[in-house]
Image (spheres, grey):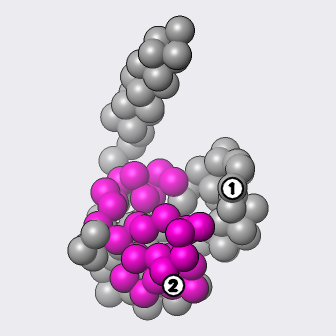
Amino acid sequence: MHVLFKSALGAGLAWALFSLPVQADGDIAAGQAISASCAACHGATGKATNALYPNIGGQNSAYLALALNAYKKGDRTGGQAGVMQAFTAGLSEQDINDLAAYYASQKP
């Protein structure tokens, strides 16, 4: 049953990622300019120094935008979701795309 759940979860995630509208290209320089508040936990280039926070440098930009939008909408919960919801509340769609482009451009 555990394997069946993992397969269903993976298929659902894949469907969600591919059925979303294509994200507008972000501006790497603009993303870097607004990344200061992210750097406190995720590091300036997306490499966290504390194991509590994920490394986001080099992550897929569409995934990063999806995650940021999910935090902003309150769809992502658990862990540090409350903190992320506060940080994403004031971001525009363009800000999200710019941040996603910036962190995707970094080395993992």
Type of amino acid at the residue the image marks with label 2: Ala
Chief secondary structure of the magenta span?
loop
Who's the residue at 42% across and 68% down the image?
55
Where residue 26 sits in the image (x, y, percent)? 33, 70
Determine which residue is flagged by label 2: 39
Residue 41 magenta: yes
Tell me which numbered mark, 1 or 2, is placed earlier along the sequence: 2
Q: Is residue 1 above or below residue 91?
A: above
Who's the residue at 53% across and 9% down the image?
1
**Foreground tag (1 vs 2):** 1
Seen as rendered, the residue at the extreme top is: 1
Splitting the image into 4 quarters, where does residue 15 fall? top left
Residue 15 magenta: no
Where residue 8 sits in the image (x, y, percent)? 46, 17
Determine which residue is flagged by label 1: 79
State the extent of the magenta-drawn residues as a range: 38-67
